[in-house]
Image (tube, coloured by chain):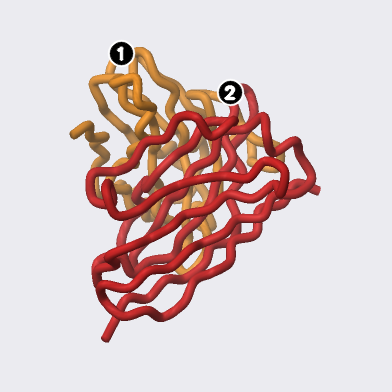
Chain colours: A orange, B red
Amino acid sequence: SYELTQPPSVSVSPGQTARITCSGDALPKKYVYWYHQKSGQAPVLVIYEDSRRPSGIPERFSGSSSGTMATLTISGAQVEDEADYYCYSTDSSGNHRGVFGGGTKLTVL
Amino acid sequence: EVQLVESGGALVQPGGSLRLSCAASGFTFSTYWMHWVRQAPGKGLVWVSRINSDGSSTSYADSVKGRFTISRDNAKNTLYLQMNSLRVEDTAVYYCIRDRTGDPPIWGQGTLVTVSS
């Protein structure tokens, strides 16, 4: 079955740039979505369709996708950005089956 | 205001059945694909199923295929997930999500399903 691969953890100091990657064979043809989730809370969409930012999401969050890898970039990460981050996409089978990456724990300290 | 409200979560014994509902409001439900996603306690997000806008096409994760059925009633603006032959590993918060190219996905608040004897 189709898989998206994320690093288990990323760590940065406050004010640094955090980059979280997501790799998958179908990404050249499929959009990627990014969510963050803090403990005990529902997921929050931070990027959709590779690079679009929903209203209310700070400009420091940006997304890009090239080839089989998508990247979520947090420019000037803040302590409140510490959370689990998940990428999401769909497979290329024609059945439009969704898949999430395993999640990346972002630590900002 | 766009809103998705899940309901139907409960404690059920292994082998039992449950039907989840997701009531949509504030948007034209019949023009959106819909998904179910779940999250077991302390675990990651897992896609479960999706249905197209008129209900004519569905797909499922391998872990639920043959046991779960997604459906919708566009006249009632409601999405369903019929879950049969439930297993302990189906224990999770279940979220419904609206999906259409060009629009950001919107999630409901989730409903908890607990499968335990």
Q: Give the numbered dot on residue A67.
A: 1
Q: Which mark is residue B101?
A: 2
Chain label for disc 1: A
Q: Quadrant of the N terminus of chain A?
A: top left
State the image quarter where residue B116 is shown.
Answer: bottom left
Quick one: SS at disc 1? Answer: loop
Do badges 2 and 1 share one subunit?
no
How far apart are the alpha carbons under marks 2 and 1? 20 Å
Q: Chain of mark 2?
A: B
Tell me: residue B16, above or below residue A12. Answer: below
Residue at 53%, 24% in the rendered image: A51
Residue at 37% in and 36% down: B59
Mark 2 surroundings within 10 Å by alpha-carbon count, few (fewer than 14), some (14 through 19), many (20 or more): few
- Image position, residue B18 (x, y; %): 43, 68
Which of the labelled discs sits on residue B116, or is there none?
none
In the rendered view, would you say B115 is above or below A106? below
Tell me the kind of residue under disc 1: Gly
Horizontal relation, residue B24 to residue B63: left or right: right
Q: Nearer the viewer, residue B61 or A109?
A: B61
Residue B52 in view (yes/no) = yes
Query: Is B17 displayed left or right of B100 in the figure?
Result: left
**A13 versus B42 height, above or below:** above
Residue A62 percent coordinates (x, y): 52, 29
Residue at position x 75%, y 35% in the image: B28
Q: Nearer the viewer, mark 2 or mark 1?
A: 2
Tell me if residue A15 can be seen.
no
Q: Position of residue A54 (x, y in %)?
A: 65, 35
